[in-house]
Image (cartoon, rainbow, N blue to C red):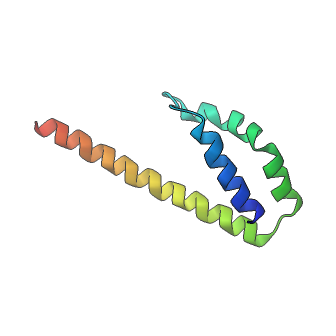
Amino acid sequence: MSRASRLIKQLDKVLDRYDTFGDDPESFVDPVLSDLQSQIEAILDKSKTKHWAEIYVERDRARIKQAVLNRLMGLSSQSSNRE
């Protein structure tokens, strides 16, 4: 498993600790980064192109997931308005 894969796996574990992010999910970024500090340093120390490529793909996956979920939420509110 690459350093980037380990970071992504650990990121998912850290995020799983929370049941909700309230109205300000951005406020969780710094604490999550702190929890991942050793994995981040490992990637920065061995800055390899393949690690960054993996991180970019994971970031893009997260953007797509967000867009899909936002549209689903929009559809949900539309169907609620029809009732």
Residue 45 locus on image (x, y percent): 89, 58
51 versus 83 height, above or below: below
| Figure quadrant of the C terminus | top left
Asked if residue 39 lies left or right of residue 78, the reply is: right
Residue 64 locus on image (x, y percent): 46, 58
Pick the front one: 55 or 8 = 8
Give the residue furthest to the right.
45
38 versus 54 height, above or below: above
Residue 6 locus on image (x, y percent): 72, 57
Give the residue furthest to the bottom.
50
55 versus 81 height, above or below: below
Pick the front one: 31 or 13 = 13
Count up the numbered dots: 0
Q: Residue at x 65, y 38 (%)?
A: 29
Pick the front one: 40 or 74 = 40
Q: Residue at x 60, y 35 (%)?
A: 17
Q: Residue at x 61, y 48 (%)?
A: 12
